[in-house]
Amino acid sequence: SRLVREGAAVGIRVVLTGDRAALTSRVGAMFRDRIVLRLADPADYALAGIGPRQVPSHLPPGRALVGADTTEGQLGLLAGDPRGAGQVAALARIAEAARRRHSHRVSGGGPMRVEPLPSSLDAEAVETDAKAFATGPGWVLLGVGGDELDPVGVDLLAHGPALVVAGPPGSGRSTTLAAVGRWQRHQGRPVAVVAHRRSPLHRLAGEPGVLACLGPADAAQLAELLAARPDLTVLADDAETLHDTPVEQPLLGMLRPDAEGASLVLAGSASDMAGCFRGLTVEARRGRTGVLLGQVAAVDGDLFGVRLPRTPPGPVGRGVLVVRGRATPLQVARTAL
């Protein structure tokens, strides 16, 4: 929407294609110039402001009604072969020629691409490339994101005091915690789990690098681990349910300004967190760093003090990474639990 609304002022032009949904969408309504090809349902022409008497009785392939005055026009072919395969091949040749011209002018290759996020991503497939994107010893891999599907992560030491993962059940909260745990363990950093027994993260018990899987009452054990291993990463699942439990106090201690070394990554329900006005999740959100998973509503951005556009529901692990007010679309990497 913003590209269409403001792009012309900075030289950006948008060409949008689609079916009847393009005529009914909010973005489609922003376009003044339209080329309307033959529609399957004659009644759909009204969505483009074209009356029944303005529609010719015969519209062959490529024939269109152009502009506000519905001028009848014929679109040109890119090559002599009118079949779809022939036109696609011609378009590919044009794109390749553009790429070559661009590469001569700009070092680094062809034009920028905006790649679609994958519906699923295996952690092992991206870990090797991710090492080049690590910004420091506290950086952890979350998945891929941005325009070019680069590895995406967050520096837990620089952007803490905590990383907060918020979303509805089934959106990939535990998956995100597991991805962080996998990365830390592979970097030789110890991990501990704090969660109710129903959390799938308890399946990590006994895995290399996982020092303990604790419950809400195990405050003494957690305090001992934090004292013994200052580089510990704590994964707290269903964090909103840990409020007013014994383990909350050592977790809050990790968020103090004078706390150093250990990192806290916690996950919970976005709606439940929004209704909390004190306690662990409120203090953890003060860093304005986290991941919003699932269908994001405009109010969800308030968790991290940002305004976000409404997004439709996606696959497990689809979300937005927010780091100190900057948002990046994200697909979380999956790992075995």
Image (tube, rainbow, N blue to C red):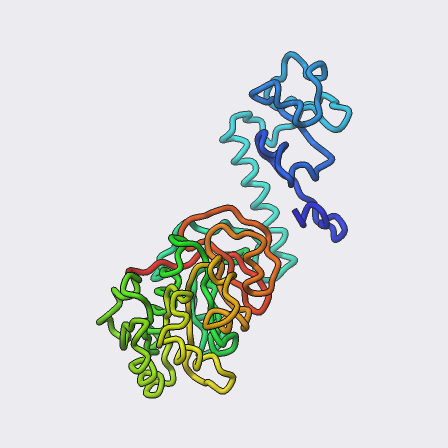
Furthest toward the top, the residue is: 57
Please tell me in which quadrant of the rendered image residue 90 appears. top right
Position of the C terminus, as image quadrant, is: bottom left
Image coordinates of residue 77 in percent, x first then y, are: 61, 28
Q: Nearer the viewer, residue 33 or 314?
A: 314
Image coordinates of residue 54 in percent, x first then y, are: 72, 17
Q: Is residue 128 above or below residue 14?
A: below
Please tell me in which quadrant of the rendered image residue 209 appears. bottom left
Q: Nearer the viewer, residue 137 or 206?
A: 206
Q: Is residue 59 above or below residue 178?
A: above
Image coordinates of residue 76 in percent, x first then y, are: 65, 28
- Left or right, 145 with respect to 56, comes to left
- Left or right, 280 with respect to 310, comes to left
Furthest toward the front, the residue is: 244
Q: Is residue 68 visible?
A: yes
Q: Is residue 127 visible?
A: no
How many dots with numbers? Answer: 0
Query: What residue is shown at x 54% (from left), y 49% (from top)?
Result: 311
Image coordinates of residue 177 in percent, x first then y, are: 38, 65
